[in-house]
Amino acid sequence: MIKAIQEYYDEEFAHCYGCGRKNTEGHHLKTYMEDDISISKFTPKDYHIAMEGFVYGGLLASLIDCHGTGSASLFYARENSIAVKNYNAPRFVTGGLTVKFLKPTPLYKELILKGELKEITSKKVITKIEVFVDDIFCVSGEVIAILLPDNFGK
């Protein structure tokens, strides 16, 4: 897989504020697999400020949420031998989100999000997500991601 998992989401499910390629106002987060770890990168903008020089916590929670569901898609496809191709990537929604703010996160630096598989079932994936800035561990999270059923929204 060369493209980010989000590029393989069905058109019907590509509107997410965090990662949707069809959402012109969104973050456009991209999630890739490197060995057994999922990776996303994001550089906060001026308006993602909490206080001078630091990132708003809601943005960090949002990024963990979206990286967690993208990671779930990657891990689920790998564990179920799904050959990901155009518009067939498994799509997940958030069933639970836990975020722990460990250190203030600097505003004008690239954030590196790393995901690790904790648990997987036929309908659920749990990932551990960590956010780093310049190799400093700033935020941790856990995402419980639920597989969308084929009949979702119908």
Image (tube, rainbow, N blue to C red):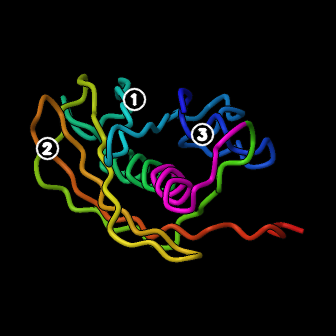
Q: Work out whether mark 1 precedes mark 2 in sequence or the reverse, and give the earlier one.
A: 1
Q: Secondary structure at mark 3?
A: helix
Residue indicated by mark 3: 6
Query: Looking at the picture, how far across and down is residue 30, in whole percent?
Result: 49, 34
Q: Residue furthest front?
A: 81
Relative side of 67 to 57, left or right: right
Look at discs 3 and 1 and give the one toward the viewer: 3
State the residue in front, 48 or 2: 2
Magenta region: which residues? Answer: 70-85
Magenta-colored stretch includes residue 76: yes
Q: Residue furthest right?
A: 154
State the residue at coordinates (30%, 50%).
57
Query: Looking at the picture, how far across and down is residue 98, in whole percent?
Result: 33, 68
Q: Quadrant of residue 93?
A: bottom right
Q: Which mark is residue 104?
A: 2
- How busy is the neighbourhood of tag 3: few (under 14 within 10 Å), some, or many (20 plus)? many
Residue indicated by mark 1: 47
Which amino acid does the dot numbered 1 rest on?
Answer: Tyr
State the residue at coordinates (67%, 28%).
24
